[in-house]
Image (cartoon, rainbow, N blue to C red):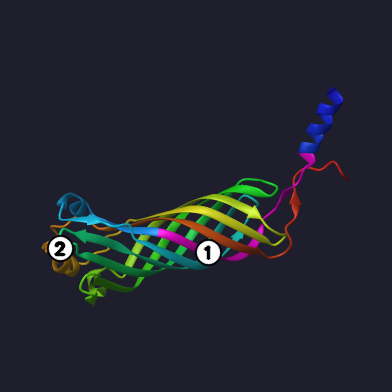
Amino acid sequence: MKKIILILFVGFLSFPSIAQEGAFVGIRIIPQSAWILNNDDFDSGEFDFGIPFSVAFSVAGGYMFTDLLGIETGILYSPQGQKYFFDNNDEVNIKNNYLKIPLLFRLRTEGEKASFLFNVGPEFGFLMNSTIKDETSGLEIDSENYYENFDFSIAIGFGTSILLTQNLYLDLLVKLDYGLTEIETAEGKEMLFDYQNNGRTSSNNALAGFSVGLNYVFGKASASGPSIIK
C-alpha cells in the first residue's frame, strides 16, 4: 500500500503543466450590457431603465513574463449607452460608441489543460460617435456635444484559460468595467436633463459582459514542472 501511495505521489509531482511564457496575439468577442449610472436619474421616478445589450470586439496582444504573470493591451470597439422608458410609452436610446485601449495585468494559476485567469487594469476610452433616438417617433439626433470625448475606466476580468493546441488558448472571462470620469458635458446636462450650473450629479459608464477570447502564442507551448525522467 505504501508503495502505491509513493508511486501516485511521485507521478503527481512529475505531471507537467503547460507554459504560456512569451508573446501572444488574440481576438475578443464580448456580449455585454452597458449603462450610464447617475444618482439623480435613479431618484427622479420620471422614467424606468431598460437593459441595453450590445457586442464589443477587439484585437489584443501581450506578453507573459512568466507562466503566471504578464500584460495585455489592444484595441477594443465598445457600443455603450442607456435605454429609458417614459410614462407615455416613449422609449429613448442613448448610443455612445467608444474605441478603448486597455492596459491589463494578466495573472493565472498553473494547470495542465486549464487554469484560473484574472485580468485587471485601466482602459482609456475615446468617444467615436453618439446618438439619441426616440424609438416611438423615429427621431434621431447627433449628441456628441453632450458627452465627453474621453472616459477613463477600470476593467476587471476573471475566468479560465484553456489549452486547445500547442499554440492556441481559449480565454473565457466575466468582464466588469466602471468609469471613473464624468461623461456628460455641461451642455448635455442642460439640454437633456434641464440641469444648470453643475446641479446634476456625475454620470459614469458601467458595463458587465462575457469575454470569449482566442490567443495564439508564438513558439510552441512547453511542459513545465518537476520530472523524474532524466
Q: Is residue 138 above or below residue 66?
A: below
Q: Quadrant of the C terminus?
A: top right
- Callout 2: helix, strand or loop? helix
Q: Which residue is mark 1?
A: 28
For marks 2 and 1, give the CA distance.
Answer: 36 Å
What is the magenta range? 13-32
Other-residue count near label 1 (Cα within 10 Å), few / some / many at <14 / 14–19 / ≥20: many
Q: Are marks 2 and 1 in contact (CB under 8 Å)?
A: no
Q: Residue furthest top?
A: 1
Q: Is residue 5 above or below residue 203?
A: above
Residue at point 19%, 64% (across, down): 90
For the N terminus, the image quarter is: top right
Residue appearing at x 81%, y 27% in the figure: 5
Quadrant in which residue 63 is drawn: bottom right
Question: Of the numbered discs in the image, which one, if any, rests on residue 193?
Answer: 2
Identify the amino acid type marked 2. Phe
Q: Residue at x 36, y 70 (%)?
A: 97
Q: Looking at the rendered structure, which numbered label has been put on residue 104?
A: none
The x and y percentages for residue 165 are 71, 59
